[in-house]
Amino acid sequence: MNIHPLFVHFPIGLLVVYALLEVVIRGRLASRFPSLVPIKGFLAVMGALASYLTVITGEMAEEAIQGTVSIPDQMSRLIETHSAYAVSATIVFSVLAVAYLVYFIERTKFASSAFAVSSPLSPIWRVIQRLSRIMRETALGPVLALVGLILITITGGLGASIVYGPDIDPFVRFIYTVFFGG
């Protein structure tokens, strides 16, 4: 039973909304809406977690198909390319999600006691905090979010090619042609 379609839409929705907020809501606009930081963090963390389930169920679907039928070489390459882009998107969004997890941990009593100045973990925690701030407060965050959005778009186009064929719409045809020619 292929449960991949049940999971695939959750990370797409969460991460697309996150990426759009990350790219669009910056600078002065973000300072007017400080509550957007935890919202973006929630979307990034939940979307990244959901993307792991989606990648796992995609691998399960691939194994199930390979176990029952012989897949033509072209379709096998299409599935592998789709999988590679899905994993790449998951990695990009996971980096951003970790930055927001650090943001959430910083606001707990645990962080102030476990990573106190006298703690042996303190220097490591300060480096992690600095990297988290760089991700969240500089142009690196929106750039990575935009890269992730592009990766999701390519993954979706390749996935549509797998399920419906490359001629389902002009956009899917374009993505398919970029990777596999006419």
Image (spheres, grey):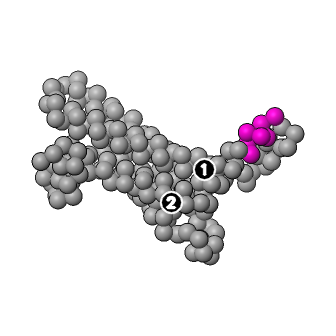
Q: Secondary structure at mark 1?
A: helix
**Three-letter residue code for mark 1:** Ala
Amino acid at circle 2: Pro
Quarter of the picture containing the N terminus is top left
**Magenta highlight on residue 40:** no
Q: Position of residue 174 (x, y in %)?
A: 20, 54
Answer with the quarter of the image where residue 171 lies.
bottom left
Residue under the image location 15 percent in, 26 percent down:
70
Q: Secondary structure at mark 2?
A: helix
Q: Which mark is residue 142?
A: 2
Check disc 1 and report the residue beneath it.
99
52 sits left or right of 125 in the view: left
Magenta segment, which residues?
Answer: 120-126
Q: Inspect this view and state whether residue 57 appears.
A: yes
Q: Residue at x 28, y 32 (%)?
A: 62
> Residue 23 at x, y = what percent?
48, 64
- Residue 53 higher or lower than 147, as above or below: above
- The Cα atoms of the two marked residues, 1 and 2, are separated by 13 Å
Whether residue 3 appears in this view of the structure is no
**Crowdedness of circle 1 by 10 Å Cα count: few (<14), some, many (20+)?**
many
Mark 1 or mark 2, earlier in chain: 1
Magenta span main SS = helix
